[in-house]
Amino acid sequence: MTTPEKLPAALIWSRTIVLACSYGLLLYFLVSSIAALDGIVVATFVIWLLQILPLLIFLRGLHQSRLRSYAWVSFVVLLYFMHGVLVAFSPGRLMFGLVEVVLCAVLFVSLIIFIRQFRNHYGVGL
């Protein structure tokens, strides 16, 4: 809808946090896949791609500040949050689960802040 250069300053910081957490989740899943399979093999990248595919679908829309992409990612991130809670309760994987839960929580809150501020500033709906 709008380019990042045209966004007001109030929206830029929430957009930056959204993108940072999104890329943080991509990196987290890569590290998690490598740790789960004890090294880098072909299966590591296959599992990593399957885990990050829902995020990759909306990544372009996040960069272009499309409001619908932000709304859909706010739904998708809840699935990742549930996965993080399940991983946190797995024996020996508490830290991996907590990192995922924190990344998802920060991402969700910043998505909601961005959507609300965007709608208030531009007066548009989803």
Image (cartoon, rainbow, N blue to C red):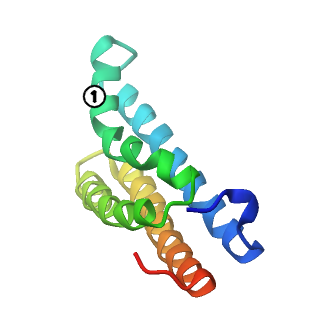
Q: Tag 1, which secondary structure?
A: helix
Give the residue at x 48% y 74%.
Answer: 109
Left/right of residue 95 with respect to residue 12 in the rendered view: left
Q: Quadrant of the N terminus?
A: bottom right
Left/right of residue 99 with respect to residue 12 in the rendered view: left
Q: Position of residue 80 (x, y in %)?
A: 31, 55
Q: Quadrant of the C terminus?
A: bottom left
Q: Residue furthest top?
A: 41
Q: Of 81 and 34, which appears nearest the observer? A: 81
Tell me the residue that label 1 is attached to: 47
Q: Of 3 and 48, which appears nearest the observer? A: 3
Q: Position of residue 20 (x, y in %)?
A: 60, 52
Q: Position of residue 71 (x, y in %)?
A: 39, 68
User: To which quarter of the image does residue 82 belong?
Assistant: bottom left
Using the image, determine if residue 105 lies above or below residue 45. Answer: below
Q: Of 105 and 52, which appears nearest the observer? A: 52
Give the residue at x 52% y 54%.
Answer: 62
- How many labels were placed on the picture? 1
Q: Where is residue 75 in the image (x, y as percent from the top left)?
A: 31, 65
Q: Disc 1 residue type?
A: Ile
Using the image, determine if residue 86 lies above or below residue 125. Answer: above
Give the residue at x 57% y 50%.
Answer: 63
User: To which quarter of the image does residue 85 belong?
Assistant: bottom left
Q: Counting other residues with Cα less than 10 Å from the Cα at mark 1, is it few (<14), some (14-19), or many (20 or more)?
A: some
Using the image, determine if residue 99 lies above or below residue 74. Answer: above
